[in-house]
Image (tube, rainbow, N blue to C red):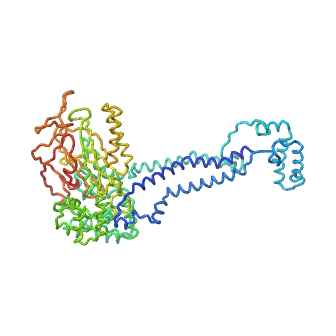
Amino acid sequence: MAASEETSALFPIFILTIMALPLVPYTITKLCRAFSKKSKSIHCNCSECFHSGKYRRSIFKRISNFSTFSNLTLILLWVVMIFLVYYIKNMSRDVQVFDPYSILGLEPGALESEIKKKYRRLSVQYHPDKNPDPEAHKFFVEFITKAYQALTDPLSRENYEKYGHPDGRQGFQMGIALPQFLLDIDGPSGGILLLWIVGICILLPLVIAVVYLSRSSKYTGNYVMHQTLSAYYYLMKPSLAPSKVMEVFTKAAEYMEIPVRRTDDEPLQKLFMSVRSELNLDLKNIKQEQAKFWKQHPAIVKTELLIQAQLTRESAALSPALLGDFRRVLELAPRLLEELMKMAVIPRTAQGHGWLRPAIGVIELSQCVFQAVPLSARKSTGGSPDGIAPFLQLPHFSESVVKKITRKKVRNFEDFCDMTMEERRELLEPAGFSSSEIQDIEMVLEMMPSVTIEVKCETEGEEGIQEEDVVTVQATITLKRPNGLIRALPHTPHFPVHKEENFWFLLADPTANNVWFSQKVNFMDEEAAIVAASKTIEDTMEGSGASVKETSAAVREAAQKVRNGARLVMGKFPAPREGNYNLTCYCLCDTWIGCDKKTNLKVKILKRTRAGTRGASISEEGPIAEDGVEEEEEDDEEEYDYESEYSEDEEDEKDTKKKAPAANGAVHKGDSSSEDSGTDEE
């Protein structure tokens, strides 16, 4: 009986241990992540971002950000743990070690006459004949009598003094740390233990497995539905125009689950009239076009109108119910756009190439969604391939203001950024901007990133590139901002949730509409970038037979470059057929408009020859072209670039002649050709 009570007393300790094992490390990890996220959240401090409330540290926002389901569950578990600690602490006070001297109220080593005298005195107080209280009887039998026998019997006293127990050396006992009522099989609660075992050991793992499998069968690792990826894959076309990307984007299964209520009809009708000019409807057959638009699935119609409300900044006119759906649509947008981009650049052709035109369209749509700029604002005007869209991402700018300042010496957004602060002030003050508004504009301009690209393609350990070779592309993308920051959140006051800026590196053939290589680049996680760059450099150096000292020096140099704002991009692709290829290296930003860079690269693929006969071709101009990347010829060559379809009708095409810069084994930096990639058309 005593043993069972002791094991039952261990049950709270057992539960506390089981809870603490996963809970303590999870809490530490969560706190570390919270502190690291806080250090990364360097955001714009302009008045528009402040009034958006997205970064405001109000009490309500702190509570709403903190009171998530996981956080509340974590707090509840810690409350249970604290209660268990308190209970165990109090329980330990009640558990007393058997000490006969203490029970009888004697000093250790007392004489036998003192023991008998104390026993007689306690007997008068607790003996059943003298005291009818059941508790007194119990105390007398279980403690006083036992203590007296342990001290008066010579053998028991010797065992106690030698082993700490009247019965001598005690054997090792093992028990189950469960309450006694669960172990009483023959009692009224005999089935509880069976239910406990079945529930904990069988049902709980089974439920967890079913939930996990059902979710994993429905979602991918990026929390995007498999049904969405299938729709994006089959709807993506090689000639998909940027304005048509919207039609593919809204077909996501996540958007189909957003409820369509009858009360939404009237607000959606009003929203349709506000954004009708952005829906690419044929004005000659406007009635038929409107009827066709409303015949689509109601969820698709609702999603497209809500996205257009974001692009045209008409969300203030939405009803409270639609505002909730509007926020849900935008919360899903970042990862859906990322998956849509992957579906555009995923290998489609026999050579393993993706498609460039839809990839550029996805980036253009992404930029407009996050900056809340209409797609029609990207219509090419004068010297600006992106139209007035880059200006509209700045605070306090509108179309009328852009028209005023572009009438003067500013032709495009690049000219505006190249001006000094004094020159911009002289330009903006006559347009009606106050000093505080000009200061906001300067803050945003200082947050805008500027990237440079250095690229080289080679076949490792060989000279030149031959057909069917595995070509290694190595690019270094360096980001700089006027304010000196590297990790920063973009200026997106009209987007309701935090959004990190991402870049996409594309090595593409614009003429053939092929993407040879693509990779996403992020500048927020410096530690992960250092680890990745160090491992890549280490593997490369070890493969080339470099010494440990040389490898360590190269790794340290790569880590320092990462800290200075550089990111290393490496990958492989199979060499195509023999010929000269005019490639373009793109670095496209998914949040900022007008910050994309591209540079040209000419690669010569040699005919496959026997082993030992490799060699690079010699340019007529002089030096040998390294790694199969050939010098550009002086003659003008005709290249076809994609120009933004917002400038002309979708069916119109035009050819442009350009003179490509020379590339001797590596691409020149991005300033040689810094036009926005989204302005290209075959």
Q: Is residue 104 above or below residue 169?
A: below
Q: In which image quadrant can residue 165 be found?
A: top right
Q: Is residue 391 visible?
A: yes
Residue lying at the far front of the rendered structure: 422
Residue lying at the far left of the rendered structure: 635
Along the viewing direction, whichever of 176 and 248 lies nearer the viewer: 176
Q: Is residue 255 visible?
A: no
Q: Is residue 274 above or below residue 652?
A: below
Count of marks overlaid on the render: 0
Along the viewing direction, whichever of 351 and 421 lies nearer the viewer: 421
Give the residue displayed 87% in from the left and 47% down from the top: 119
Along the viewing direction, whichever of 517 and 28 lies nearer the viewer: 28
Q: In which image quadrant can residue 34 be found?
A: bottom left
Give the residue displayed 18% in from the left and 63% down from the top: 410
For the N terminus, which image quadrant? top right
Q: Is residue 203 above or below residue 376?
A: above
Asked if residue 288 lies left or right of residue 559, the reply is left
Residue 44 percent across, percent down from the top left = 35, 61
Along the viewing direction, whichever of 36 and 588 lies nearer the viewer: 36
Residue 496 percent across, percent down from the top left = 37, 63
Q: In which image quadrant can residue 413 be found?
A: bottom left
Q: Is residue 344 above or below residue 315?
A: above
Residue 221 percent across, percent down from the top left = 40, 48
Residue 134 percent across, percent down from the top left = 83, 54
Asked if residue 446 lies left or right of residue 324, the reply is left
